[in-house]
Image (spheres, helix red, strand yellow):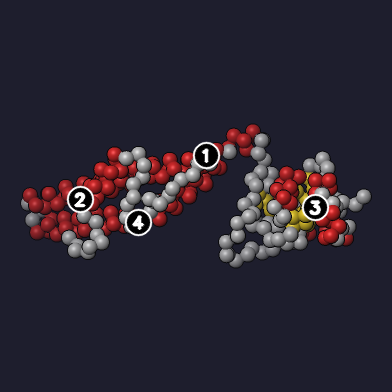
Amino acid sequence: MSKNPDSMSFEDLSSIYRVEKKSRAISAVRKDLYSAMAGLVSELRTEYEKHLSADPDSIICEGVNQHRKKALSLSKEITEIRMEKVAGLALIGARGGLNVLDNLTPEEREYYDGVLLISKKHMGLVDKLSGRRKFETPAIDPEPAAVKAPERVRAEEAPAVEESIEDARATEPAAEEQAEVPQENIIKEDETVVIRILEDLPPFSGPDRNYELFKEDVVRMPKAMAMALINRDKAAVVNPRP
């Protein structure tokens, strides 16, 4: 067996299992839990193979083999118990609850984030299918990831609208004039409105198409989606001709 002071012993593994089995909350463990469990199983397998080569029928060889099997079994049970607890935390988070995640390992935090995301999506499934929510509100407030920008989609490639992009910009009031006209007074009862994008936005989906918009693009979109952008100062209404 390895003498590495950072390695996990069989007694350490058994202790973690007993704590996890007894407690409803996820316990604090070493951050390298999974690599440490894997290291222990690997060490026990190596020891077993050594005894197997020397004397496969010995009691010592059989004892080491049973030790190896037990360590593998405990490792799997600990993984499953903690997975169940992490998934429970993610469901609480999807409902709007606050979780303390300090006891999660990096691997478990990644698992939590994935379950949280899919749980939020699944909880809104009935609203989406029943028509109460026809589109996803884009996550436009956080800074976008530092990745290579996709090929820019120009405004003229967007679906045709009643007025051309040039006409819309030509009839757009000056910035100071826009500030004097409340946005809600410009938007009447139309189902769609034309807006001008004020900054580059991450891609997002609408009820009938996907959007990939950049600063100064002019586009027609559903009123509710347009207002979501306007209220966050991401877009401004293009005032239609009188």
Mark 1, Cα crowd under 10 Å, few <14 / some 14-19 / many 20+, is few
Q: CA distance from mark 4 to mark 3?
A: 51 Å
N-terminal of the pair, mark 1 or mark 2, is 2
Q: Secondary structure at mark 1?
A: loop
Q: Secondary structure at mark 4?
A: loop
N-term mark: 4 or 1: 4
Res 31 label: 4
Q: In which quadrant will I find the N terminus? A: bottom left
The residue that label 1 is drawn on is 95
Badge 3 crowding class, 10 Å Cα cut-off, few under 14, some 14 to 19, many 20 or more, is many
The relative height of residue 208 versus residue 148 in the rendered view (above or below) is above
Question: Tag 4: residue type?
Answer: Lys
The residue carrying pointer 2 sits among few (fewer than 14), some (14 to 19) or many (20 or more) residues within 10 Å by Cα, namely few
Q: Amino acid at mark 2?
A: Glu
Q: Which residue is painted at 72% across and 50% down in the image? A: 231
Are discs 2 and 4 less than 8 Å apart at CB?
Answer: no
Q: Residue furthest bottom?
A: 148
Gap between marks 2 and 4 measured at Cα? 18 Å
Check disc 3 and report the residue beneath it.
Answer: 237
